[in-house]
């Protein structure tokens, strides 16, 4: 095998490889913020939105409190991803949320939206396993603890 081909196929990742995790982090954060902003605006206007998916899972008596509890978790997760703070912890919530919604979409036969959720689930799972120390508060905290 040619040495150039071998070095291309089996080389160690470059230092720039960590920025891929930053892109995943920001992509998931953008999706989350895009989905929660209309709910917060509706709540501020005095017309809270009830999530039909939450109603199906938990019943109609708890739909508004749970909708905004999950909205709060999504907002905190998005802020966590933007800042790079507690990325792995926020990824746990993202994996759980996207897996539940993806399962519902697949069972309903909605393949177009399920592909998007599958990509978000995969990105969140990668962040759960690897974290994202570049351009993040997690990386800054780790450097201060080790003294590097």
Image: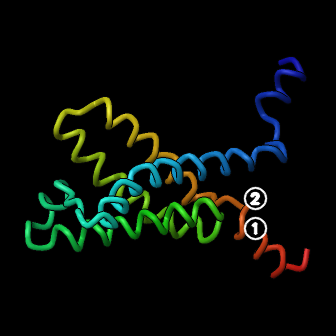
Quarter of the figure with the N terminus: top right
Camera-side residue of 118 and 48: 48
* Residue at (83% x, 73% y) in the render: 143
**How far across and how far down the image is residue 9, in percent?**
76, 29
Quadrant of the rendered image containing residue 137: bottom right
Numbered tag placed on residue 100 in the rendering? none
* Residue at (24% x, 71% y) in the render: 66
Which secondary structure lies at badge 2? loop
Q: Which residue is mark 2?
A: 135
**How far across and how far down the image is residue 134, in percent?**
76, 57
Q: Which residue is mark 1?
A: 139
Quadrant of the rendered image containing residue 95: bottom left
Tell which tag, 1 or 2, sits nearer the viewer. 2
* Residue at (30% x, 65% y) in the render: 43
Camera-side residue of 54 and 115: 54
Which secondary structure lies at badge 1? helix
Reply above or below: 42 against 118: below
């Amino acid at each position: 095998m040619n040495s150039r081909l071998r070095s291309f196929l089996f080389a160690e990742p470059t230092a720039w490889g960590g920025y891929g995790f930053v892109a995943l982090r920001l992509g998931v954060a953008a999706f989350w913020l895009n989905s929660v902003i209309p709910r917060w605006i509706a709540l501020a206007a005095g017309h809270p939105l009830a999530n039909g998916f939450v109603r199906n899972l938990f019943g109609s008596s708890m739909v508004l409190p749970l909708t905004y509890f999950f909205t709060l978790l999504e907002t905190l997760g998005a802020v966590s991803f933007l800042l790079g703070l507690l990325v792995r912890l926020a990824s746990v919530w993202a994996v759980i949320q996207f897996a539940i919604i993806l399962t519902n979409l697949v069972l309903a036969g909605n393949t177009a939206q399920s592909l998007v959720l599958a990509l978000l689930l995969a990105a969140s799972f990668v962040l759960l396993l690897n974290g994202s120390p570049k351009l993040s508060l997690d990386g800054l905290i780790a450097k201060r603890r080790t003294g590097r």
